Amino acid sequence: MSKLAVVTGANRGIGKEVCRQLAESGHTVLLSGRELEKAKAAAADIDNKNIHPVQIDVTDVASIKGLAADVAERYGRLDVLVNNAGGHYDYWQTALTADFAAIREAAATNLYGPWRVTQAFIPLLRKSDQPRIVNVGSGAAALNSLGAGPPAYIVSKAGLHALTLMLAAELKDEGVLVNAVCPGWVATDPNNPGGRPIPEGAAGIVWAATLPDDGPTGGFFRDEQPLAW
């Protein structure tokens, strides 16, 4: 059987393009979205027999466990997990004036979501010969250059970077490669109409999802090149 990938937040933008590129490389791809109908529409638009739409809400524990159970029953393993679902780019706020409701929402999607999804799918990843986890991070949350900016988004993405390092260390001896990838400033919401083409941003994520066994783990990358945390 071909390698199996789950991509969260994949009904549009970078996630959708990651699914397209993985499917073209021969992966069986579960394109997931919070709403199944939107996932179906995205899969139909790509029109590749290797892509199958599924539903997952990364802020809903029951939804996460439900998809993990379904994958276990249908496939028995998982080779690639791309934690792409994210958002809450709160450019209208500052750290001193931030609404904590917005902070909680951002953390629920950008940090707790990938954390819970990884916990749910790690038993299936451990059954793979080449397990890979890719967390879609952000250069805006790199501590070496961090300054003012959308606080809920940046702090939650910085937390995701920290989680990446912890997971990589815990799973290193099991051959599970865990990395964070910044796709760059891509022409998707909320960046549109500025930004680089979506396929260019997605390519680095696909690279990390298909690393060889001697590839890096616990790294932060953009365009296959290391970034400082």
Image: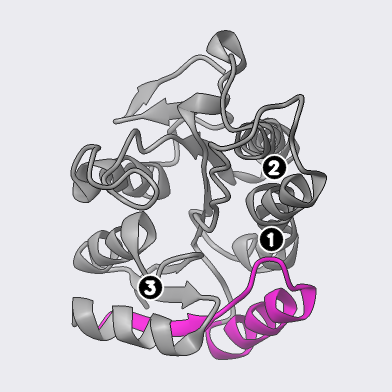
Reply above or below: 148 against 222: above
Q: Secondary structure at mark 3?
A: strand
Circles 2 and 1, Cβ within 8 Å, touching? The answer is: yes
Q: Earlier in the sequence, mark 2 or mark 3?
A: 3
Q: Earlier in the sequence, mark 1 or mark 3?
A: 3
Q: Mark on residue 171?
A: 2
Q: Residue at x 71, y 35 (%)?
A: 159
The percent coordinates of residue 152 (x first, y second) are 67, 39
Amino acid type shown at disc 1:
Ile
Q: Mark on residue 11?
A: none
The percent coordinates of residue 176 (x first, y second) are 59, 46
Separation of marks 1 and 3 at Cα, in angstroms: 17 Å
Quarter occupied by the N terminus:
bottom left
Amino acid type shown at disc 2:
Leu
Would you name the residue on which mark 3 appears? 29
Q: Secondary structure at mark 1?
A: helix
State the extent of the magenta-drawn residues as a range. Answer: 48-75
- Looking at the image, residue 201 sits to the left or right of residue 101; the answer is left
Quarter occupied by the C terminus:
top right
The quadrant holding residue 200 is top left
Reply above or below: 84 against 19: above
Reply above or below: 174 against 95: below
- Looking at the image, residue 203 sits to the left or right of residue 99; the answer is left
Is residue 68 found inside the magenta-colored segment of the image? yes
Q: Earlier in the sequence, mark 2 or mark 1?
A: 1
Q: Mark on residue 122?
A: 1
